[in-house]
Image: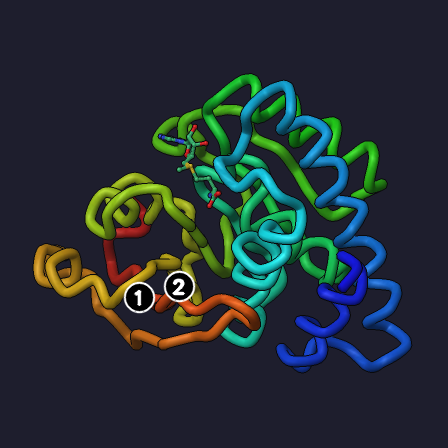
Amino acid sequence: MSLENQLLDGLEKLACGLPEERKRLAARLQQYILFLDKWNRVHNLTAVRKPEEMVTKHILDSLTLLPTLNGKRHADVGSGAGLPGIPLALVRPDWHMTLIESNQKKCAFLTQACVELALKNVKIVCERVENFFPSEKFDTVISRAFADLSAFVASAVHLCADSEESRLVAMKGKFPDAELMQLPPQYEVEKVLRVMAPGLRAARHLIVIKPGSERSN
Ligand SMILES: C[S@@+](CC[C@H](N)C(=O)[O-])C[C@H]1O[C@@H](n2cnc3c(N)ncnc32)[C@H](O)[C@@H]1O
């Protein structure tokens, strides 16, 4: 199956967009994969080397977040090669994504990817998340493969908007029993969702956390 058809099939299974729109989204997502593949050959941005594996392991996995995010302003902490932030920005041009990444080489890739893909709804912050204090905060603060839950929350809770609806969402593989037990009690785990990325057999979980009163610290 071609990359574009693999993406189309995955978008359909995720119930993402209407049929005509899905074709356009699949073409945009393919453009991102091809650009990531080109850079990855030289700069080693991700261990997933085959574009067809990037479809499931990176793109469709990132898009499992879609039904869980509320609001329009989202931050992706430790975004790496733009995951999950860039796939989300591509399929939801009405959202604003801020990608926070401390590694200069990865930031250079992210900046070029935004130019190549003409992404107007993405901001790159090349800084450690602990040192980033934006004037406007976020409805959702997301991470994938960034840190254990306690470290993620401790370093990024200050980015959550001062509203009842703001959340931190960590993307995890198997159910993270030990990490959940270690999470300090001031953070309320609102829900743990088991999600399926089309074509990916591995277990995936989204941990949705309320920031509590810690966010303004
Ligand atoms: C394992 S990678 C995951 C990348 C991407 N989220 C993914 O799922 O493919 C973790 C990323 O977090 C970045 N990182 C580590 N500590 C950070 C910090 N304190 N602030 C911002 N980025 C950080 C690293 O440079 C790296 O790119």
* Horizontal side of residue 11 vs 127, given as left or right: right
On the image, which quarter does residue 2 sit in? bottom right
Q: Quadrant of ligand 1?
A: top left
Q: Secondary structure at mark 1?
A: strand
Q: Residue at x 24, y 52 (%)?
A: 149
Q: Residues within 10 Å of mark 1 (few under 14, many from 20)?
A: many
Q: Which residue is mark 2?
A: 167
Q: Is residue 147 above or below residue 38?
A: below
Whether residue 36 is situated above or below residue 104 in the rendered picture:
below
Image coords of residue 39 (percent x, y): 68, 26
Q: Is residue 110 left or right of residue 169?
A: right
Q: Amino acid at mark 1?
A: Lys
The C terminus sits in image quarter: top left
**Quadrant of the frame with the N terminus:** bottom right
The front one of 55 and 68 is 55
Q: Which residue is mark 1?
A: 210
Q: Please indicate whether residue 86 sits to the left or right of residue 138 in the image.
A: right
